[in-house]
Amino acid sequence: GEDVEQSLFLSVREGDSSVINCTYTDSSSTYLYWYKQEPGAGLQLLTYIFSNMDMKQDQRLTVLLNKKDKHLSLRIADTQTGDSAIYFCAESNRGNQGGKLIFGQGTELSVKP
Amino acid sequence: NAGVTQTPKFQVLKTGQSMTLQCAQDMNHEYMSWYRQDPGMGLRLIHYSVGAGITDQGEVPNGYNVSRSTTEDFPLRLLSAAPSQTSVYFCASSYSRISEAFFGQGTRLTVV
């Protein structure tokens, strides 16, 4: 079945780059997403990438997709304390009904000053 | 713009009680979903709907019912609450099945 895996924790120092990794099993995944969840809040879409792309950059965010290895990463440049949150990788494909997203467990990013 | 609104934000139930978690969106989205979030498990899909009058089960549907009588509303019912249903519940909506999902702020439910 479909599965998405992430490591649970990442700790970095302010100003460093953060790299959050995700692996997925569904080879028919069409869209891959990164969501951010701040404490006590819902999820907010950060960025997404289509499966026919290798890379997408959006200001401090860079998404890399290795479709062969089914590996997705999110790089945050110049990480700030305000970036501390839980980051979820999610995937969907054209065959999914109802906007169904398959989520990873979430990576808790801790940014130390 | 309200987006996706969930009520209540917090709820404590006794085992066996029933309740309805409310979800409403004002974006005219056809697709709506309910997820539960548990530590270390990410978000798991409970039920979803592709439009008014159409619902289907997700990954963890047992113990929950849904209905979709209007485009705007998608309530989630717990018929007989159990401690295993202690979780944070999120409602989401999207324009299409592959477009961005907008999430509500969540309902933190504790069943004692």
Image (spheres, helix red, strand yellow):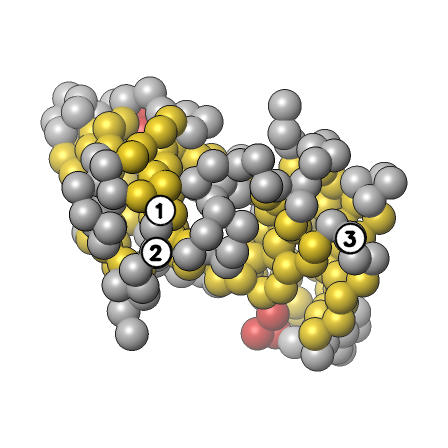
Q: Chain of mark 3?
A: A
- Residue B25's spot in the image, x, y percent? 27, 58
Q: Quadrant of residue B85?
A: top left
Same chain letter for marks 1 and 2: yes
3D distance between C-alphas at marks 3 and 1: 27 Å
Q: Quadrant of residue B5?
A: bottom left
Tag 2 residue = B29
Q: Chain of mark 1?
A: B
Same chain letter for marks 3 and 1: no
Tag 3 residue = A52
| Classed neighbour count for the residue bearing mark 3: other residues with Cα under 10 Å, few (<14), some (14–19), many (≥20) | few
**CB under 8 Å between callouts 1 and 2?**
yes
Task: For mark 3, give the secondary structure.
Answer: loop
The residue depicted at 48 percent of the width and 47 percent of the height is B97
The amino acid pointed to by label 3 is Asn
Q: Quadrant of residue A5?
A: top right
Residue depth check, mark 3 versus mark 1: number of the one nearer the observer:
3
Q: Is residue B39 visible?
A: no
3D distance between C-alphas at marks 2 and 3: 26 Å
Q: Is residue A112 left or right of residue B96?
A: right
Q: Is residue B98 left or right of residue B67?
A: right
In this rendering, is residue A9 above or below B64? Answer: below
- Residue B59's spot in the image, x, y percent? 46, 27
Tag 1 residue = B32
The amino acid pointed to by label 2 is His
Viewport quadrant of the N terminus of chain A: top right
